[in-house]
Amino acid sequence: MSETATNLVWSESQSTRGARLVMLAIARIADENGKATATLEQISKLTRLSARSISKCLVELAALGELGRQRGGGNANPNSYSILLGQVPERASAPAVEVPSSVPEALEAGTSFPEDASQKGTSVPASENVLPSKSEVSSSRARGGNTPYGSITTTQKQAGLLGREDGKKNPVSGSVEVPEGAKELVSAITSAGMIVGWRLDESEWARVTALADRWGPERLVELVTRRWNVDRPPQSARYLLRIWDDLPSSGPSTSSTENVVPLRRQPGGWAPFQNTAKPSAYQNGF
């Protein structure tokens, strides 16, 4: 499992719904370079989507420019996929400015040259015109004309995301710190093929940890599986908290025999059945 590819999909992919689920499944089996080899059956087991739906999602991801695919031939030679996120096309470089390696003799002698009036006060380093600042949002993402459904279209939201990423120690990975008491539950839900985002605050993580301790991962995963919609999978774990809110406030009983009623013993010990009408060895003693 490539954690780098998975985090890259969460942070930079513009895919939604089924296409995002397919993208996360491929990232799960990809290597550190974003390369993966899998059949449609393997992706179907991870996403619980049909082969036809997966094919449509692959076409959508290719149109977004996020996934490259090389067709194979059967189970012996499955398809090869390449995650193209993070590969920024090279910008057109500014024309190179020749810098003299040595000072001209006229300058060494102290000769002054008149400065053009149009260039006074407008001297700007060449690097400022070439490299954009971090807070600048590209014009291609700012416009909302051909933006895919579900992606961010406003510059205000994009600037907020950039600000949050700058505050992290590692903005590219975007990893989530999972509390120790919730790691088993998160791993069980992910292994079941139900992939959601786990960016929760402290109070929400406290609820998840308390539920995992009270009910156990198996019971919580079973409840989510019953209400999981494959066609419209949720994007955040907050949807799972709404499902778990249906559980009773009191946890399961600690003893498994509390609802078992013991049989009452007859006073005087065990008394065998006696048929007084037909006293035979076969009919008596039952």
Image (cartoon, rainbow, N blue to C red):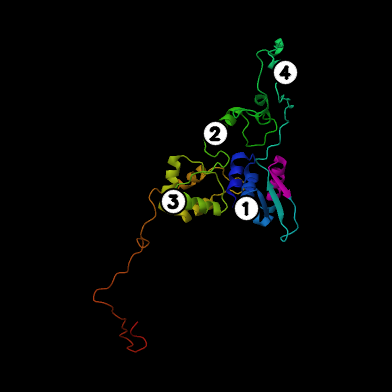
Report how far apart the C-alphas of labels 4 and 3 lie in the structure. 80 Å
The residue at 61%/33% (across/down) is 152
Identity, as a three-letter code, of the amino acid under mark 4:
Glu
The residue at 43%/49% (across/down) is 211
Residue of label 1: 29
The residue at 45%/44% (across/down) is 205
Tell us which disc is closer to us: 1 or 2. Answer: 2
Label 2 vs 4, first from the N-terminus? 4
Whether label 2 touches label 3, CB < 8 Å: no
Report how far apart the C-alphas of labels 2 and 4 lie in the structure. 48 Å
For label 2, the crowd category at 10 Å Cα-Cα, with few meaning under 14, some 14 to 19 and many 20 or more, is: some
In this rendering, does residue 247 appear at all? Answer: no
Looking at the rendered structure, the secondary structure element under dot 1 is: helix
Tell us which disc is closer to us: 4 or 3. Answer: 4
Is residue 79 shown left or right of residue 281?
right
Label 3 vs 1, first from the N-terminus? 1
User: Where 12 sits versus 143, above or below?
Assistant: below
Looking at the rendered structure, the secondary structure element under dot 4 is: helix
In the image shown, does 91 or 265 lie closer to the viewer? 91
Rendered image: mark on residue 212: 3
Residue 23 location (% of width, % of height)? 64, 47
Identity, as a three-letter code, of the amino acid under mark 2:
Asp
Rendered image: mark on residue 105: 4
Looking at the rendered structure, the secondary structure element under dot 3 is: helix
Residue 216 location (% of width, % of height)? 44, 54
Of the 4 image quadrants, the one containing the C terminus is bottom left
In this rendering, does residue 87 appear at all? Answer: yes
